[in-house]
Amino acid sequence: MNIGENIAEIIENIPNNVTLVAVSKTKPIEDLELAYKKNQRDFGENKVQELIYKEEILPKDIRWHFIGNLQTNKVKYLVGKVHLIHSLSSIKLLRKIEKEFSKDKIYANLLIQINIGKEESKGGIFEEELPTMIEEVEKCEYCKVKGLMTVIPKGNDEENRYYFNKMKAIFDKVSKENYKNISMEILSMGMTHDYKIAIEEGSNLIRVGEGIFGKRKYLGGDLNE
């Protein structure tokens, strides 16, 4: 199957309320253009430089998602170019985003990344740190949290379901509260090999790379696809 057929198959098999983010990191412009021709508009990148490069070349109606570990010294380059930052993972980063986006009076749409499996190899805050993060978000003017994101530990279907269910419970708990800068609109979880289970457990945004563009051609981590 080709890129267009892959996208069509995924769209056909997910609910209308679920957003498909095509994880396009390391992929050439030509591959993104093929996806775009099939009406794919949400693309995910995990390197700031690569996102900026592609954003300048490709059509302006694309919604760029930053899904990788975001270094504070790179935040300024995303101002006005990114639709959603999935990886808010520290108060230090939050304050830097607030500072840089406030300069241009642009709102930053964010997801708080939860390290649900408490893995050293993954970013995100622990569940018990969420109240402190929420408290800090409420002090901001230009940072708007739109939901939560996670990358679960690798496991079998039953283990995956356990972590997705746990994330949905956290999401629902926060949803019941009233905040100035926080609205639980997006639960970003599920990737190529587990997105169907993630959707069953409440995800409304999936991040798919290999399932659209095929296997990556180099060795390296693929934590977000």
Image (spheres, helix red, strand yellow):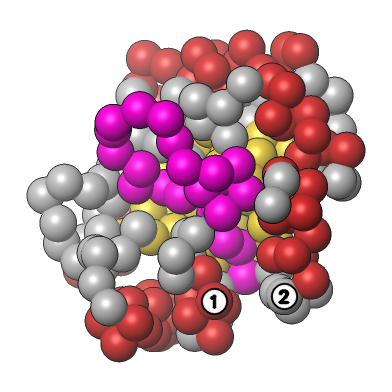
* Residue at image point 73% right, 12% down: 56
Q: In this view, does 65 lie above or below 57?
A: below
Disc 2 secondary structure class: loop
Q: Name the residue under label 1.
A: 196
Q: In this view, does 23 lie above or below 28?
A: below
Disc 1 secondary structure class: helix
The type of residue carrying mark 2 is Asn
The image quadrant that residue 204 belongs to is bottom right
x, y percentage for residue 107?
Answer: 66, 36
What is the span of residues highlighted in magenta in the rendered image? 204-225
**In the image, 224: left or right of 78?**
left
**In the image, 170: left or right of 98?**
left
In depth, the one of 153 and 213 nearer the eye is 213
Magenta run includes residue 223: yes
Characterize the local packing of mark 2: few (<14), some (14-19) or many (20 or more) Cα atoms within 10 angstroms: few
The type of residue carrying mark 1 is Lys
Q: Mark 2 points at which residue?
A: 13
Q: Can residue 119 be seen at all in this image of the molecule?
A: yes
Q: Can residue 142 be seen at all in this image of the molecule?
A: no
* Residue at image point 46% right, 49% down: 225
